[in-house]
Image: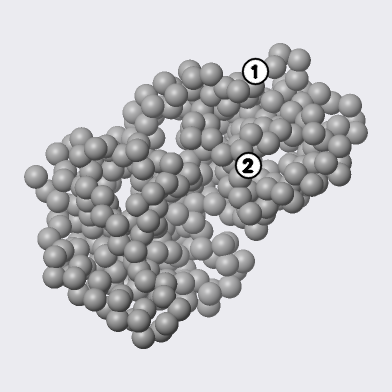
Amino acid sequence: MKKLLFAAHDMSLGGIETSLINLLNYLVNNNYDITLVLEKAQGMFINDLDKKIHIIEYSPSTDKNYIKRKCHNLFKRIKFIFKHWHRYKFSASYATYSLMGSFVARMASSNCALWGHADYLALYKGDEEKVKEFFQNIKYDKFRRIVFVSKEACNTFTKIFPDMKKRVIYCNNMINREKIEKLAKEEAQIKASRKMCTFINVGRHDEQQKKLTRIIEASKKLKEEGLKFRVLFVGDGPDSIMYKEMVDKYNLNENIIFLGQKNNPYPYIKISDYVILTSDYEGYPVVFSEAMVLEKPIITTDISDAKEVIDNNYGTVIGKKVEEVYQAMKQYIRGDVIVKSKFDVDAYNNEIKEILDKIIKKKV
């Protein structure tokens, strides 16, 4: 049985963690021996991992004493190298930003890959020097493969690092249709409504990236026109309080409902009419595929591969101004939208499996 190693930060709620679970559970059930190294062996998703997966915690010291911290981390590095040096057929740093993950993956196998989950040029607001600094810190050039979950992210990376073009590959996130459909049947804490249109946003409350103020500002205009609708916010984060204060200020408490973080968001997607994302940047949002499985039309800003995948097939791609969010929501409230394409999950996953097989076996 071939041994594979993956490294990540933890198993908290998030799109990266959901994708990692789907990937590892698929691999471990296809005759691979999987080891997962986490900086923190915790998080609400950790129990969703197949029990056959070996979990190791590797927590770098954060001691304020510089000498103690350096000595402790050096000892841990030497210990890891002694035990795991090139013992694996393939290894991957799945949390791109993790310095620990980069080190672990590079030591575990010469056939190592770095996963990228964002368009980093968009993340750093067009500052190429910051993008270069980010990837240099994680020693990007020491990886055999750099895997991006969106074509757009591949393209921007290779523009900044043209010498890496032959090492970069596109491979989207796998989707567990059976799990989504099964969990969607569970009861939601609120009921579906026939009297009003329901939108849902699932994600971290982080204004720098997610820009949920666009939904709130658009909702204010919709309410002023007397339109009947509600928006479900599933998730939380550093800007939850700010969002709630805006909703209070605009008297939108009956229109925007904060549901908090949910282990299982699928019943809430199921009772909603539409999924809405207003982010400034993303990798390839997992919620795109989840909405497509549950046949929910999507409103999204122009992020990742949205124009290629979503627009005119599974929903509408819009610009990043509040007016455009407002106009799209208004159109959807009127019921002027249908999903034109049926999402073929099996074909989608099979393509990803073929690419993964080639990456792991060094055929690409």
Tell me the residue at 16%/43% (across/down). Answer: 32
Q: Residue furthest bottom?
A: 67
Q: Amino acid at mark 2?
A: Leu
Q: Which mark is residue 242?
A: none
Q: Amino acid at mark 1?
A: Lys
Crowd class of label 1 (few under 14; some 14 to 19; many from 20; radius 10 Å): few
Tell me the residue at 26%/65% (across/down). Answer: 104
Q: Quadrant of residue 161?
A: bottom left
**What is the quadrant of the C terminus in the image?**
bottom left
Instruction: Say which of 31 and 318 sits in front.
Output: 31
Instruction: Say which of 331 and 104 sits in front.
Output: 104
Q: In this rendering, which labeled residue sits more in front, label 1 or label 2?
A: 1
Q: Is residue 297 left or right of residue 36?
A: right
Which residue is the site of mark 1? 191
Q: Is residue 269 left or right of residue 143?
A: right
Q: Is residue 35 left or right of residue 140?
A: left
Image location (x, y in percent) of residue 135: 42, 71
| SS class, disc 2 | strand
| SS class, disc 1 | loop
Crowd class of label 2 (few under 14; some 14 to 19; many from 20; radius 10 Å): many
Which residue is the site of mark 2? 277
User: Would residue 239 be visible to someone looking at this image?
Assistant: yes
Mark 1 to mark 2: distance in Å?
Answer: 22 Å
Image location (x, y in percent) of residue 323: 80, 44
